[in-house]
Every structure is written in structure tokens, then in C-alpha cells.
Image (cartoon, helix red, strand yellow):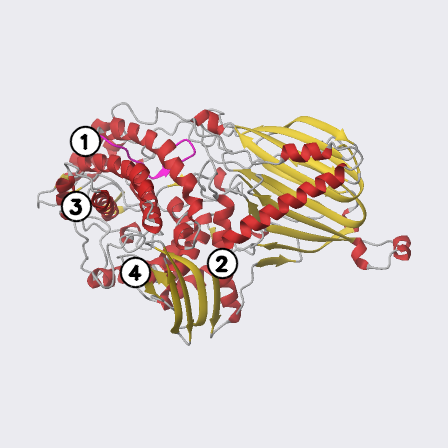
Amino acid sequence: MKPSFRLNSDSPAERWGEAYPVGNGHLGAMIFGTVPVNRVMLSENTFFSGSRSDDHCKPHAADAFAAMREKAIQGEYQSAHEAAEGFIGIRQDYGTNLPVGNLQISYGMPGDAVTLLDRSLDIMTGIAVRHLQVKKTEQTCLKRKAQKRDVITEKIYASWPNHMLVAEITGMDPFSLQMYLEKISCPISQTANIMLNTHTAVLEFESRALETMHCDHPTGVTLSGRILISSDGVLSDGQSGVGGIQVIAATKVYLCMDMVTDYTERMGFPAAVDLSDFACLRSAAMEPLCSIRAVEREIKLIRGRHLYDLRKRMKRSSFELETKSDPSLAEKITFLYQYGRYLLLSSSREDSVLPAHLQGIWNDNVACRIGWTCDMHLDINTQMNYWPSEITGLPETTAPLFQWIEKALIPEGRITAGKCYGRSGWVGEIVSNAWGYAAPYWASPIAPCPTGGVWILTHMWEHYLYTGDLRFLHNRVYPTVKEAVAFFKEYVFEDHHGNYTSGPSISPENSFLHNGQLYQISNGCTYEILMIRELFSIYLRIAETLGEEEKDIHEIQEIRDKLLPYRIQEDGTIAEYAHDLAVPDRQHRHTSHLLGLYPFAQMTPEKTPELCKAAELTIQVKTTPIEQWEDTGWASSMLILYEARLKDGNKALIHMKRMIDHLLEPNGMIYHPPTRGAAAFDHVYELDGNTGLTAGIAEMLMQSHDDQIQLLPALPDDWVKGRITGLKARGGKTVTIEWENHQLKSYEIKP
């Protein structure tokens, strides 16, 4: 079945999960398509409240950590948690990403005079299209011969080559509209309204990212924006105190917007590349007598560059599928594979200032108003955002992630390593933000957790594995890994059995019972040990590849080989902790102790069959009964990825179907419902649900860990026929696979 790349609806979006997303890695927009006022919800990559600070560690945190370790060794968990009060971080002005506001496009006619015919989003072009029907009067019926004359067409897209949001509005008969900005949470001040001539105007505006839920003081970036409106109609200042621009008697209206904040100046980052064609547009608009034609020529160029840019990236990989059970399911799966790629490309581009946060490039005004907020979570979410980058042929999306690790996270992580732990190197904890927060979380239930930085830096290593870029390995990966190793070499310690262990820390974001009380902090958490094992293994492989003769190589190898091994409990599941204390919520959404299965390959069916059998049983316990499983988009994606690595495509498909049936919004976005462990007042959109699903589909069809390429390793029985192109394997290979009647039909592997 040929895949569909289009979302369609004949009704306006009543809520976020029905609106259509566009983005260019700098700004994002959710297009609701409401009538008669079209609501376009705006967001910007760096529009964060908060500020950078070196003051997130408590004065005697390192002493408190030493006390916690001693108490944890003795099994005195209550005392360890009490000592943690002197260790946990200081939230001070942490901040969050905030929505910028709404761009409102209001048509100059009564609500019942204009109706929505249809709206759509083509994810191969990134253009959202809407058709409006203007109600005919008896007089106009006599003058008009074709119904199409009464239709107004809107096209909205976010151009990456030209760094702007563009709206093209056309109709065969004259129409009127008013454009204005409406605040959501942060005030918007209109700083200038410049009438260039009767057909063109520029509106300049400003906003501050200010809130006090996640900040101790009202502080945040300043955003500056500008909107150019050009039309063959007559322009004037907005009416009725609304502000903005009014357009009368137009058949063509072009609107172009760009936004930028002072984030790079505050952080000392390289300034965002200004690719906006605003100067060209403004010059074109000033041409005498033919300004609209000149602007139209520029818009045509902008649209052409946008289409070429997005299409060529999206077409790097294609996916066709036929199922024996349900053709509509095949259509949904092929669409969602590409949709995850589209959302990632929209959120993170090679010159984005910051990586994709919890919601990508968008902001639903929910995630920024809850406790766990719109930031960079380092215990699964940011990592999952980028899992499709390499394997589905979008390596450029990782550039802002690597820049943020090096310029924001590591500098703060050095402070945390020294002040909070009394050790060398750098660490990143469970959450971070635009400002590079690397200190422990400010509440002991989810601190300490010093391996968040390890997990996120593995993306840099993976980038090398996929590209073979030795310069990148030597200049960027190696220094980052080496400095992290410096911390963990000092962090681990020998237990009374002669094994190396670590801690105290947590297993995100789970708990255990001791003497009837709930605790989180202990030594030797499986998650932390496997992360340290992975870090040390990467370090040793880099040293071997580059021929580095580091004096501590043998020491690191000895420590790695003597780290606490995985442990299978009496019930056959993989232990989450070094102790056997009961876990009260066995159906908790986090499965961090299984990360050795995916994204890493510490467990494989070929090399560690007993561990893989235990991992499968762990998943069964987590999801039985299914009604008690703490289901979220990203958690379901993890189950798909685990089953793919276990080579069980049928079980992976079961989790995929459940995700589609229960967690999929009408606009294709996968959400995080309020759960017992992650409270929220509404569904929260998270990018990771979509990107995790895309990565899961890719892993079901091709795997390349352990220095070998496996074709169709987890093909479900239901997927009888299909073809996928453009998958990337480690080692710089491009893979095409075709199958029929559940058998490999052909394949191609290109170096």
C-alpha cells in the first residue's frame, strides 16, 4: 500500500491534539484553523524563563554525599535520605520553555458568513492548507458562475532556509482580514507598526519569558519579532483596540514572521544564523507601483527553497507496508514512521540554538505549567527525541544537541562534580534546561542521579559510529568522554565482595520499601552500573581507535570488568537494585534497568540468552495486567524497542497497536496522559512518543549493533509485504530492504 503523508479534517481544531504543527528548528506554530478567527499558536526554540547560575549546589553537598554513601552501605536508608537534604540541588531560577503567543487571523465578515471546507497538513512539504467557503448572498449569486470564486485558500509553513513563518492567503473575490497578536502567558508589546505604503506594513513586537512557577524571580529571555504583511488590498492600523494590521478588499495577502531572543548573548553561544529574507521582502515591498508583485516573486522563491529543503530530507527514507489484518493500520504505521521524522526535523536543525525540548519546538501551555515542565529531561526524554536521527537518515538534527552538551551542560557539570560530589570531571543529573542545569534535582526522591550526562553523551559516540568521522571523534567525542570518565573513575568503589559498585543514587524514578517505608536512594542501582559500564566501554574503544596511550586504560578496563554484574531475581526478572527489597510499583513506567537491551547492546539474544529471557519476563510483569501498566507515549515506545531487540516483532506490534489505540491524538501526536507518577492537569504532548515509535519501527526492520547488520530481525507476522529505504547502519551504510509473504525478497547495502 502506498503510504499517505497527509493529515485531513473538515472541522477546526478545538484543542491542541487536533491542531497541525509546522516548524523550522527556530520557531514553531500549531495551526488550529478556527473560524472566523484562525488561531496560530507560536513558539520559539530559546524562549525560556530562568537564567544561568553557578549557585545550584549546597555549600557542603560533597560532605552530605559522603555521609549518604556510608549510610547506604550500612542499609540505613532513612538516615541516607535525611543526609540527602544537605546534598540536593537548589532550583533557583530554573525556568521553562513558554509559548510566545497566538497569531490571530480574523476575517472581516460575520462568523456565519465564512465556513471551513477542509484543512490539511502534508508532512512531505510541511505546508498546512485550509479552504474557507464564503457564504453567497442573492446578489453575489447573480454575479458568480463558479463556486470556486467564493473560496479563500490559506497556506502556512515554516521555512528553514529563510528562517521565517509564512502565510499565503488568496481568493478569487476580494476579502478582508485583520491580523493581530494575542498573549497566552507572557505579555506581548507592539513596539512599532510601520506602514511602508498602502499595500505593505511591518509590525514589530517584543515579549519576555517570565513566570514564577519554575523561577524564584521573574527572569528570562527577551524576544523580538517582526511581521511583514503585503497585499493587493488596502492596509491600515488595526481597529477596535485590538492592534495589528487590517487589510481591506484583497485577493492576495502575504504574511512573513521571524523571531529571535537574546539567549545567545546571555550564554555566549554562537549567534543564530540570520537566514531571514526580511530585508529582501522589505526592499521588494518598497518598489514603486508594483510592490505586491515584487513581494510575490520573493515569496515564490522562499516557498521553492522550503519545498526543496524539506522534501529532500524527508525522502531520504521511505516506507511501504501491507498487513494481512487491517489496511488502515498499515497506513497509520507508515504515516507515523515519517511523522516522527517530520516532527524531529521541524524541531531540531543544524543551526538551531538549542536541542529539542520535551515538546520539540512547540509548547502546549500545559507542560510549562506542571511540576515536571518543558525542559531537557535526561532520564529518557531528550535521548528518545534523537533516537531516529542516525538510523532514519537525519544526522544533522543532532548538531544543536551536541552544541548544548558542550557549551551548556558540561560547564555546569564540572561545577556539580566538584561542589556536589568532591570529584573531578563533569556530570549531568536527571533534568536539565536551556541554561545547562547539571546539579542534583531539588528533591531527594529523584536525586542523586549522576549518569544523565553519560546517557546523553552516548549520542555523540553513536554519531561517530554511524558516520565514521574521525575528526569528530578526536576533537569532540573523546574530550567529552574522557572528562566524564575522570569523574566515574573516582565515583565507583569496591564492595566487600571485591566488585565495583557506585552510589548512592536512584533508579529513575522508582522506589523500594524498607521497614514499611518508601525510599529511593541506595547503592549499586542497575541503571547506574550499566551506564558506567557503557561509558568505560566507549572510552576504551575510542582509545583503541585513536591509538591513544592513556595511563589509566588498564585501570578503567579492570574497573569495568569488575562492575556489579546484572542479577536475575528468584522470580526470573532482572533486578533493578543491588538489594532484594520489594518494589511497591512493579508496573512503574520507567524501565531504566533494561537499557542494556536498548539503546545499548549489553544484552543480546545471541550473547546473553538468559539475561534476555529475564528481560522479557520483566516486561511481562510490568505489563500484566495491562490496565495497571503506567502507560505513556515514551514508555510504550520503550517496550517496542525492547521487543525489537529481543527479536519478537509480534509483541512489538502489540505495544504499537495499544499506543495507536490509546495514546494517539487526531493530529498524529502521541501524548503523555496524567499518571500516578507524573501528575498533570491535562494530556501533555511529548515529542519522544513519536520519535520513539519511529526508532522502534526502524529497529524492527534493521539492526546494526555488535558490528553486524541484521535484516528484518523483528518482523511481525502481520506485516506480510513491505519495503523500506534509506535506513542507516553503523559503519556508514545505507540499507534498502524489501520483503513479501513474510520473507526477505531483496536488499541493498551501500557504503
Residue 621's tag is 4
Q: Is residue 429 magenta?
A: yes
Give the residue at mark 1: 66
Residue found at x 18% / y 34%: 490
Give the residue at mark 3: 560
Specify start and end residues of the magenta stretch as a single range: 424-436
Residue found at x 63% / y 34%: 278
Q: Is residue 151 visible?
A: yes
Mark 2 crowd level (few <14, some 14–19, many ≥20, 10 Å Cα): many
* Percent of width and height locating residue 142: 91, 57
Corner quadrant of residue 436? top left
Comparing labels 4 and 3, the label whose residue is closer to the camera: 3
The mark that comes first in sequence, 1 or 2, is 1
* Residue type pointed to by label 1: Ala
Give the residue at mark 2: 336
Q: Nearer the viewer, residue 667 or 560?
A: 560
Asked if residue 292 lies left or right of residue 189, the reply is right
Corner quadrant of residue 206? top right
* Percent of width and height locating residue 227: 66, 34
Q: Nearer the viewer, residue 549 or 425?
A: 549
